[in-house]
């Protein structure tokens, strides 16, 4: 009986919790504005701390707290040892709490500039942002930076919590001045509706309920605002979007497409179109683990079964024919750069949007955004925590909506191809019209026909190594030997190309990347012509060499590493460049103040210290013979 009674008591509690709405919000602002303390206060006053947690909090407050004999509420969410030692937030801390009216998931994000990327991660799923300001300091640069990111990410509700009012004697004039300054700035970045609340996270003023210390303030407490703000439902009114995450085929009798509805509503019998293929069909079933549904709406994870057999893959998008997303391989976007390594235009990255992953390059940085003044500034690259407006080019078309129209369809991340680390988050502004004007022109004579005519297989011999390692000397010997055998060849030499095609480029990392991109595309054209091409470039970065490899068919790219130490190359110094670099007369010289990333798995490695140029040529020719590049058939 007791067990049955307990179960009967628990069920209504679960039902009550299930009926409550959920609000995801973020706390952000400058360092030491009291974000962690505010969340700790909310958890404490919501009675969501167990007795052992409270005892530990009291004990920790005495050991590492920053509030003297008082409880340091920030310790409830600052879980990392480094955070407690320094009294700062480093990582994003997510906490759940509930009140009688609503459930909450709050993300406590760091205030330091170097951890801005963590703040952006927390804001990406938020429906409300609580931006804290220290009443003694007012609006700071980091306040503006976080507010701008919140506006970029289209967080719909903003609360300005002016904290530490107890340290300014709850002065209304201070509150009014900061509120007016922030509202003016907010309007300049497109935030028109801001609720300003004077609080003291330490003492709880206006956190859970109105405070007697601020009789001049007639607005809601912070919790009252959190409980009453309307959670946006625009996703239901938007056009139907369904990025396919998985082709679900457990047996021969069932084929469905699984994913989460990004926006809109779909019902059985509705007409759909798949993109980018543009094939149409109708919804036959909407399948879930708990049975079929007559309709599905934004946020629901379902499997769609179509009336017709259509070739659909992961990353495709199912939409309504009357309101289709755009499909393009070029667009303009806002980028928040999150990597310690700078963004380099023309460097290949992986772009992941929805469930699709494609190769992408930043073709142009149109301008950077000064988050303090909102001014547009010129630049050639982005460094960590900078925001820029860029043009991007993809190697395959994707379906998308502008970020302001549909966030799941308009957001993406850039991933480093070598480390697999996320380097940037992006918000698509619009597709580029130039993409609509470019089409592939069919050609009657293809690469196979050109290669057969020349009685050889196309190849790109990519010589890489430090200046003075012997790349050009060996490449010249290879061309002479191939020419003597009647083979069709060409040499692309780094110095020679800079007299013409790349004469506008310097030697910064950005220019080096573009230098290799152009040569990579040229090499691809040479391979299409059926030629054996020797490319002699320092090409210091692995990412760009990998990019060129990706442009060519399997087996066409042969990386040849001419391995020579910096000391050996400097002793040769055939062009006098090392002497100038040592004297400081040349900047960005590879091996001195610009890095060289040696190949990790080159097809051919030549030891320049122990191998003569003739012996190196013998080794390369042997490789070409063994792999049938010189075939006469």
Image (tube, rainbow, N blue to C red):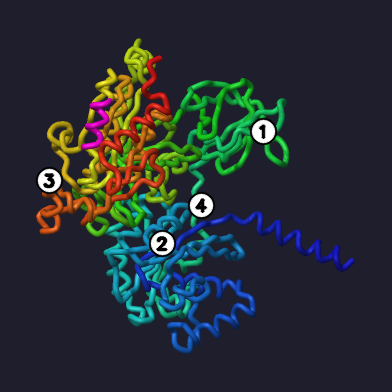
Does residue 480 belong to the magenta stretch? yes
Question: Label 4's element?
Answer: loop
Question: Label 2's element?
Answer: strand
In the picture, measured across the screen, residue 301 lies left or right of residue 596, that is right
Circle 4 is placed at which residue position?
Answer: 231
Q: Quadrant of the C terminus?
A: top left
Q: For the magenta stretch, what is the residue range?
A: 473-481
Mark 3 vs mark 1: give the one in front: 3
- Hey, which residue is sitting farthest bottom in the picture? 69
Mark 2 vs mark 3: give the one in front: 3
Mark 4 vs mark 3: give the one in front: 3
Q: CA distance from mark 2 to mark 4?
A: 14 Å
Q: Main secondary structure of the magenta part?
A: helix
Residue 557 locus on image (x, y percent)? 37, 32
Q: Is residue 542 visible?
A: yes
Chain-order first, disc 2 or disc 4: 2
Q: Quadrant of the N terminus?
A: bottom right
């Amino acid at each position: 009986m007791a067990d049955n009674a307990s179960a009967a008591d628990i069920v209504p509690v679960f039902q009550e919790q299930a009926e409550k709405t959920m609000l995801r919000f973020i706390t952000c602002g400058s360092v030491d504005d009291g974000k962690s303390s505010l969340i700790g206060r909310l958890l404490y006053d919501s009675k969501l701390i167990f007795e052992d947690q409270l005892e530990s909090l009291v004990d920790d407050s005495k050991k590492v707290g920053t509030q003297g004999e008082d409880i340091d509420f920030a310790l409830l969410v600052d879980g990392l040892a480094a955070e407690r030692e320094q009294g700062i937030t480093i990582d994003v801390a997510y906490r759940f709490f509930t009140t009688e009216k609503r459930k909450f998931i709050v993300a406590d994000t760091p205030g330091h500039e170097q951890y801005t990327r963590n703040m952006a991660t927390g804001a990406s799923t938020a429906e409300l942002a609580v931006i804290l300001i220290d009443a003694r300091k007012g609006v700071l640069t980091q306040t503006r930076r976080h507010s701008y990111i919140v506006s970029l990410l289209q967080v719909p509700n903003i609360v300005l919590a002016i904290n530490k009012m107890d340290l300014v004697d709850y002065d209304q004039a201070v509150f009014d001045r900061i509120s007016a300054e922030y509202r003016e700035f907010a309007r300049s970045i497109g935030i028109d509706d801001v609720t300003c609340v004077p609080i003291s996270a330490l003492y709880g003023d206006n956190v859970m309920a109105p405070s007697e210390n601020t009789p001049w303030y007639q607005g809601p407490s912070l919790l009252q605002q959190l409980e009453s703000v309307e959670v946006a439902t625009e996703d239901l009114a938007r056009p139907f979007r369904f990025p396919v995450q998985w082709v679900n085929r457990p047996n021969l009798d069932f084929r469905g497409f699984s994913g989460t509805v990004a926006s809109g509503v779909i019902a059985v019998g509705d007409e759909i179109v798949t993109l980018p293929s543009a094939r149409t069909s109708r919804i036959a079933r909407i399948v879930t683990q708990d049975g079929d549904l007559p309709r599905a709406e934004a946020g629901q994870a379902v499997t769609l079964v179509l009336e017709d057999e259509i070739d659909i893959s992961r990353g495709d998008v199912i939409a309504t024919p009357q309101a289709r997303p755009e499909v393009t391989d070029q667009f303009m976007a806002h980028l928040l750069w999150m990597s310690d390594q700078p963004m380099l235009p023309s460097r290949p990255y992986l772009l992941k949007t929805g469930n699709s992953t494609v190769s992408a390059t930043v073709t142009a940085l149109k301008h950077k955004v000064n988050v303090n003044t909102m001014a547009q500034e010129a630049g050639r690259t982005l460094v960590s925590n900078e925001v820029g407006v860029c043009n991007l080019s993809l190697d395959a078309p994707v379906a998308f909506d502008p970020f302001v129209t549909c966030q799941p369809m308009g957001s993406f991340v850039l991933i480093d191809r070598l480390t697999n680390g996320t380097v940037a988050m992006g918000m698509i502004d619009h597709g580029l019209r130039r993409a609509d004007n470019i089409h592939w022109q069919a050609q009657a004579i293809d690469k196979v026909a050109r290669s057969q005519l020349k009685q050889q297989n196309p190849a790109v011999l990519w010589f890489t190594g430090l200046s003075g390692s012997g790349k050009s000397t060996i490449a010249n010997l290879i061309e002479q030997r191939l020419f003597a055998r009647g083979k069709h060849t060409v040499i692309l030499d780094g110095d020679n190309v800079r007299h013409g095609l790349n004469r506008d480029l310097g030697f910064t990392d950005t220019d080096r990347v573009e230098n290799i991109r152009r040569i990579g595309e040229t090499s691809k054209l040479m391979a299409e012509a059926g030629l054996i091409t020797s490319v002699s470039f320092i090409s210091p970065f692995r990412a760009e060499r990998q990019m060129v490899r990706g442009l060519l068919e399997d087996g066409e790219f042969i990386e040849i590493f001419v391995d020579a130490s910096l000391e050996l190359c400097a002793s040769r110094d055939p062009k006098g460049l090392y002497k100038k670099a040592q004297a400081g007369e040349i900047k960005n010289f590879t091996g001195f103040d610009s890095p060289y990333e040696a190949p990790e798995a080159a097809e051919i490695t030549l030891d320049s210290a122990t191998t003569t140029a003739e012996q190196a040529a013998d080794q390369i020719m042997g490789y070409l013979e063994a792999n049938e590049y010189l075939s006469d058939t």
